[in-house]
Every structure is written in structure tokens, then in C-alpha cells.
Image: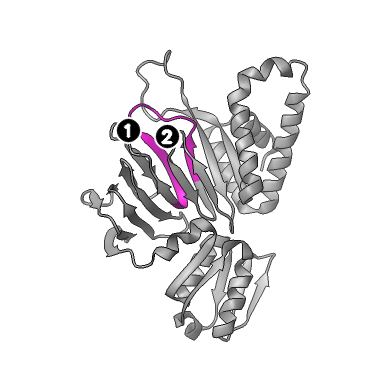
Amino acid sequence: MDKEILQRYVEGNVSTEEIIDVVDWLDADESHVREFMALHKLNDISLLNQPDAQIDIPKKKKTISFRKIGYELAKIAAILILFWGGTKLFETNPNPVEEEPVTYQTLYVPDGQRAELVLPDSTRIWLNAHSTLVYPTRFGKDVRQVELNGEAYFDVTHNEKQPFVVKTSQLDIQVLGTEFNVTAYSGSPDLEVSLLRGCIELSSPSLPSNYRMKEKEHIKLKDNKLVVDHIKDYDYFRWKEGLICFNNESVATIIEKLKLYYDINIEVDNPKFMKSRYTGKFRTKDGIEQVLKVLQIEHKFTYKKNNDLNLITIK
């Protein structure tokens, strides 16, 4: 990554394309995250050591508040808050003099971790491992909008005059006030939505019409078609508590979820093992190898981990 771009990112002077490049670079390796945090810390120290630092502090009070919150989240959940330097508008601003542009922030959760966030409207969001949420520091007048790549659980504050919209790569989800779970990883062709309470509407250019979900429904978008079912296992949503729960799941399904949660490649050279089924709960923080060791108790297999290739091979 170009050092000049990183420095401008920290200072909040980058383009949208450069923001995406930085986020992808951070997502590629943990050492990149450490390098970024070190650069951010040096920048903060240099700002505090400026002669006019005392004069600027009151003007930056709000920004420092968000930074402090980010550091606290990082200590508790081992996550990283990335501040977007660029600004956007959710909607066309008819009066640019009175209306200030909305600043976006990005919350990224590394593999094996989770995070909880409260938005300005009191909406609560839980982010699962290897997920990214783009959200504003304040909402516009007509819509509350966020962007998700990964898995998140939403408890949206009701507001009929200001719908809440979750944008994903494949479809948009519009709500007024409700509780639902979304799985929309960019690396997976499938998208899933589970509605626990309230009412939400799904829309996408690939769908012939909008679909309004009912409570306790589970929707899977596959090959641009909606597969409608009912929620069968509420324990699944305990990932918010740091638990990975499987209820009579095939090992093939478990492997796919582990690959997403821990951002690791897994190759299995044992077709019989992939068809086996398992029910159990694991703590996310215990790591992927703990899951494999527990599975070894019931299913005979061996595995080898290659840290350089970020690969686990199962035989």
C-alpha cells in the first residue's frame, strides 16, 4: 500500500476509490492492521504536539469522541474502526448552506471476532466476524441508510417517517422498526435474511417484484430467486453472544461457515466426512482449531494447518 495514500487516509483526504483500496488492504492481512494503527497513533501524537493544539481541541470535540469510542470497542471486541475521510450525501441537498454533508464511518470486524454498535437513532447492530458496516454519523431527513458486507443482526428503532434501509451487494432491505438477521458476504453467492419481529421489504433489480417478509420467515436468495422457509433454529442467532451454534448441520455446511467466520481456506479430501452431521455450540474466541478438535471426537479425520498459505487441509 502506498504510504502517501495511507497518510492521506488518516488525515481524511482521500477519494472513494482510495478508501476501498485501503479497506481491501487492511482486510488482506493482520500485519496491515497493525501498521495502520501505528501510523494513526503517530498522526494523533503529532496533532497533540502542535503549538495550537489547545485552540483546535474544542472544534474537534465531536470527532475525538468518536475516536475514543472506536478505541474502547477495539479493546473490548478486538475490532478496528476505520474512519472515512471523504463525505457524501444520502440524498440531494436542496439547501447546501443550511445542510452539512453527512460523514460516513466504516466499522470492520476481523475474523473470529464480533462487535456491537448503536447508531444515532438508537438502532442496535451486532456485526459478525469478517463483516463491514458503512454508516453515517447522522441520518438525513428522509431515510436512514447503511451498507453491509457480511453478517449483521439489526434491532431497528421504529420511525414511520424515516424508513431504515440496509444495502447489500445483491438486494436492499427496507424497514420501519423490526428485528432481523442478514447474511450477505461478498465472497458467497448466497444471501440470507431472517425476520424475527416486525416487517421488512426486499427489493433488487434481479427480482420481478418486491417481496414483503412475514415474522419468523427465512429467505435465501439463490440464483436470483427467493427461497422462502421458516426459521428452524433460533440458537443460530446466538452468534451475537459469541457462540457458533450448529443444529444437525452437515459438515459441508459447517466448513463453509468456518471459512467465512475465520477468513481461512479449508480443503477437504474426505467426501464421507463432508456428509456427516453435527449438533453443538462453540465459542468464537476459542478459534477454528478448537472447533476441529471437537469434531474429531465424533468423526475420525486429520488436519494440517499452513499459516503461510492461510490454509487448513482435512483428510
Name the amino acid, label 1.
Gln
- Look at mark 1 in the image and give the residue it sits on: 162
| Relative depth, front residue between 254 and 194 | 194
Q: Position of residue 163 (x, y in %)?
A: 32, 37
Q: Is residue 12 visible?
A: no
The C terminus lies in quadrant: bottom right
Q: Residue at x 37, y 39 (%)?
A: 157
- Look at mark 2 in the image and give the residue it sits on: 121
Q: Is residue 315 magenta?
A: no
- SS for callout 2: loop
Q: Nearer the viewer, mark 1 or mark 2?
A: 2
* C-alpha distance separating marks 1 and 2: 10 Å
CB contact under 8 Å: marks 1 and 2 = yes
Q: Residue at x 75, y 34 (%)?
A: 42
Q: Is residue 143 visible?
A: yes
- SS for callout 1: loop
Q: What is the magenta range? A: 133-152
Assess disc 2: are there few (<14), some (14-19) or many (≥20) residues with their C-alpha within 10 Å of its C-alpha: few
The N terminus lies in quadrant: top right
| Relative depth, front residue between 187 and 258 | 258
Q: Residue at x 68, y 42 (%)?
A: 36
